[in-house]
């Protein structure tokens, strides 16, 4: 029924190297942290600018 030595399982693949170096990973984490911070700060700053423009338009 089975042929002797006819099929052998494929060998284990070699371990994959990390896609990012430690420095690249650190830079990416800093960029994500800055973007998250800007997500909270930018709407407040944007609202301040809008309020300033509206105040200038109302008062002349």
Image (cartoon, grey):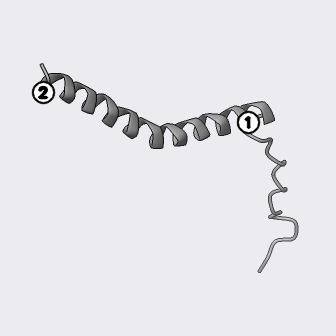
- Mark 2 or mark 1: which comes first in sequence? 1
Q: Which of 36 and 58 is in front in this view?
A: 58
Q: Nearer the viewer, residue 24 or 57?
A: 57
Within the image, what quadrant is residue 10 found in?
A: bottom right
Tag of residue 60: none
Residue in the picture at 84% in, 48% down: 14
Side of 28 relative to 37 (left or right)? right
**With respect to residue 40, does 24 lie above or below?**
above
Residue in the picture at 27% in, 27% down: 52
Tag of residue 26: 1
Tag of residue 58: 2
Residue in the picture at 46% in, 41% down: 39
Residue 31 position within the rendered picture, expressed as x and y whole percent measured from the top left = 60, 34
Q: For the C terminus, give its image quadrant.
A: top left
Residue 30 position within the rendered picture, expressed as x and y whole percent measured from the top left = 66, 35
The kind of secondary structure element at disc 2 is: helix
The kind of secondary structure element at disc 1 is: helix
Q: Which of 17 and 12 is in front in this view?
A: 17
Residue in the picture at 46% in, 38% down: 41
Side of 47 relative to 8 (left or right)? left
Q: Nearer the viewer, residue 20 or 56?
A: 56
Q: Hey, which residue is sitting farthest front in the picture?
A: 59
Q: Are marks 2 and 1 in contact (CB under 8 Å)?
A: no
């Amino acid at each position: 029924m089975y042929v002797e030595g006819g099929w052998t399982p494929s060998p284990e693949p070699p371990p994959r190297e990390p896609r990012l170096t430690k420095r690249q990973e650190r830079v990416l984490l800093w960029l994500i942290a800055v973007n998250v911070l800007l997500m909270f700060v930018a709407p407040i700053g944007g609202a301040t600018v809008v309020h300033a423009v509206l105040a200038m338009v109302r008062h002349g």
